[in-house]
Amino acid sequence: MEPNESTCRICGGRVRAFFDFGRQPLSDHFPTEEEVDQEFFFRLAAGMCAECTMVQLLEEVPRDRMFRYDYPYRSSGSEYMREHFRDTARRLIETELSGPDPFCVEIGSNDGVMLRTVRDAGIRHLGVEPSGAVAEVSRAKGVQVRTAFFEEATAREIVDEYGPADVVYAANTLCHIPYLDSVFRGLDVLLGPDGVFVFEDPYLGDIVEKNTFDQIYDEHFYLFTARSVETAAGRFGFELIDVERLSVHGGEVRYTLARPGRRQPDPRVAELIAEENRRGLGDPMVLEKFGTEVKRVCWDLVARLRELRDHGYYVVGYGATAKSATVLNYTGIGPDLLPCVYDTTPEKIGRMLPGSHIPIRSAEEFRTSGAHYALLFAWNHLEEVRSREAAFTEQGGRWILYVPQFRLV
Ligand code: SAH
Ligand code: TYD
Ligand code: ZN
């Protein structure tokens, strides 16, 4: 096997790299001073399967390294996302969960941001969340959670205890799970005959179109398209019956799967697949071009940051996102170009960004930092951040985005 190739986790076909970002640390592990010399590194490369077109990482990071007790990501950290998940829950309640005594399972329920609305409606529910501390946060909100990884064995335990599910839902989680064969065997056991599996994840079509390459990091093992999801679903005994494009996190697709022949697929499925084919999303050349463009944008960012520093401007980072790891560790941008990054998450403050060891400070400190420019790693929350930090621009500060390329906003 060449170093630029791996075996597809879905179909066993040949995966060829189009994107190689080299040695990278875990993206959601923010070390303290004492922990800096114990970081775990892996090779971040993504490729497409020549058989089934599934885009996936070449190297898999063991799940227990990523989703530990103290996994720091908190879904409720953004008002926009809280609204998104409240609306999602309400829609599920009105549609798939409107029968007698419905049951809803969420894979990767995190701090309970979605299930709390299901709970408020008095609907039977269960979150499956392996990261212990965040599972506790959701329990404190009255949400029922099992601290476990969802896989076939977990699904068997759940169905024995609660009976079949009407809806299994997952947001920004299915793409984190390399072992989809086991997940789908679990769904087969857990879902009732007319049950649906609804999941939403970053969409390869948006990533290529908007150059949001920093969505590629350790946790995002798969980058789905309607075409690759339809093929994988068929292989695992399900059918793709609906797709919906979402604006969250820079562009996602919500996929609905059912047992084959139980529901009429919406025409939107065939339409989106036709659009993907027109755009060449299954064409290795198109993806290679994307990979090349991304590297240009990364090095351009370094040049611009050097220029600003050399002209005496003070540039800081904003948003200690998982996304920031990819660009920082590829380019080697460190505290010399970006002395610190500010964030609202208590679990991250006082720690450092992985690999680059840029210190993370509280958003309150941002207000007195005296920064001229702030590089926004949470670019998906631009509007929310801009209004929270309105004083920054009122005092003459400027926000910098690096996707689709370097620009001031
Ligand atoms: N659904 C939330 C959280 C996304 S972060 C949101 O959209 O904001 C991904 C979450 O999935 C993490 O909390 C992680 O601990 C969890 N996770 C990872 N692998 C999992 C698995 N196999 N089963 C269930 N949850 C998993
Ligand atoms: P997010 O972009 O959701 O995710 P990821 O880590 O997957 O790339 O993370 C947003 C981060 O930005 C999170 O650490 C919280 C922080 N944040 C702020 O500091 N201020 C804000 O106004 C908002 C909305 C988020
Ligand atoms: Zn494949």
Image (cartoon, helix red, strand yellow):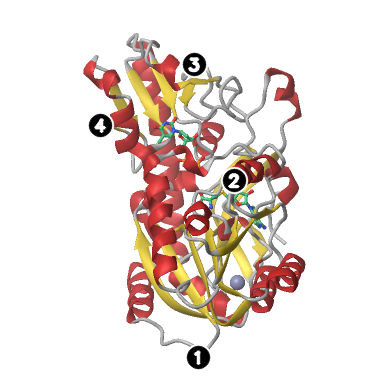
Mark 1 and mark 2 residues within 8 Å of each other at the beta carbon: no
In the image, residue 153 sits, relative to residue 303, either above or below, namely below
Say what amino acid the circle numbered 4 marks: Val
Q: Nearer the viewer, mark 1 or mark 4?
A: 1
Say what amino acid the circle numbered 2 marks: Ser
Under circle 3, the secondary element is loop
> With 248 as the anchor, is 56 left or right in this view?
right
Q: Which residue is mark 4?
A: 409
Q: Quadrant of the N terminus?
A: bottom right
Q: Which residue is mark 1?
A: 261
Q: CA distance from mark 1 to mark 2?
A: 36 Å
Q: Position of residue 285 (x, y in %)?
A: 44, 62
Under circle 2, the secondary element is helix
First in sequence, mark 1 or 4: give its number: 1
Q: CA distance from mark 3 to mark 1?
A: 57 Å
Q: Position of residue 236 (x, y in %)?
A: 63, 79
Q: Is residue 282 visible?
A: no
Mark 3 and mark 2 residues within 8 Å of each other at the beta carbon: no
Q: Nearer the viewer, mark 3 or mark 1?
A: 1
Q: Which mark is residue 138?
A: 2
First in sequence, mark 3 or 4: give its number: 3
**Residue 364 quadrant:** top left
For label 4, the crowd category at 10 Å Cα-Cα, with few meaning under 14, some 14 to 19 and many 20 or more, is few
